[in-house]
Image (spheres, rainbow, N blue to C red):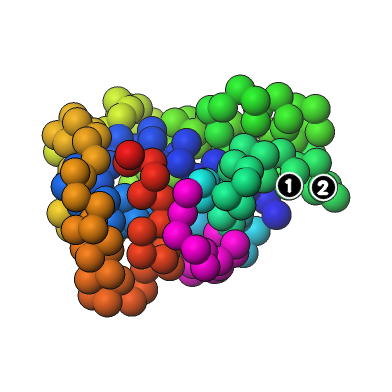
Amino acid sequence: MRFLIDGYNLLHVTGISGTGSRAGTLERARLALLNFLASTLDTAERARTTIVFDAQSAPAGLPRQLEHEGINVLFADRKTDADSVIEELIQSHSAPRTLTVVSSDHRIQRAARRRRAKPVDSDAWYYDLVKQQLEQRETGRHPTSIEKPPLPLSPQAVKKWLAEFDVEGMKTHEETGSQASDHPSSAKADNAEEAEQNPGNPFPPGYGNDLLE
């Protein structure tokens, strides 16, 4: 494993959120993040990347592990949290000096330093990936410097980001106010409908809805 990523921490710095009336859109935000990582990291890097998400109060039957375009996706057990899972993975890593831990959480960064792993703030790592994508798209051109964009991203940048990775109907935190739905049953129905319409979504319907409550 080369990259160990705090999933929601990285998602947060992008400024992307689900629309308040449809909890299932949080799943789509996670999917957009995974698609972004898959499109930026090369095959070898994806095979050595693990991203961890919380699963507190998630629906029964949630898988603990799955793969998305070669990326290892882990879900914390309901009795624990992503931070604890990440700490365990750092502690058990056979060569921690080769590990980059992506999180702005100080607890996780301390755990990485104790094992001589390399902690990187989520916003800095995300910016580097965006810069890498821009350079990849320049035909034979490699800019020596790119002005660092503000984080979270502006609403305009978010819309472009989501369109790039085939995710529609998403808004920024500023647009939604991060408000949860007043009708849980409607949200569950929306989740089921989205799962049928998007079979490529690795997240089970309703996963992570507790984060919107």
Q: Residue at x 22, y 36 (%)?
A: 179
Residue sitting nearer the eye, 46 or 134: 46
Task: Where is residue 155? Give x, y as percent.
Answer: 16, 36
Q: Quadrant of the C terminus?
A: top left
Asked whether 61 falls inside the magenta stretch, the response is yes
Q: 200 above or below 24?
A: below
From the viewer's perspective, is 20 left or right of 11? left
Q: Report the residue marked by disc 2.
A: 92
Residue 10 in view (yes/no): yes
Residue sitting nearer the eye, 182 or 200: 182
Q: 72 above or below 88?
A: below
Task: Where is residue 165? Give x, y as percent.
Answer: 28, 59
Q: Secondary structure at mark 1?
A: helix
Q: Identify residue type, mark 1.
A: Leu
Give the residues in magenta. 57-73
From the viewer's perspective, is 209 left or right of 46? left
Q: Report the residue marked by disc 1.
A: 89
Residue sitting nearer the eye, 64 or 154: 64
Q: Residue at x 36, y 59 (%)?
A: 206
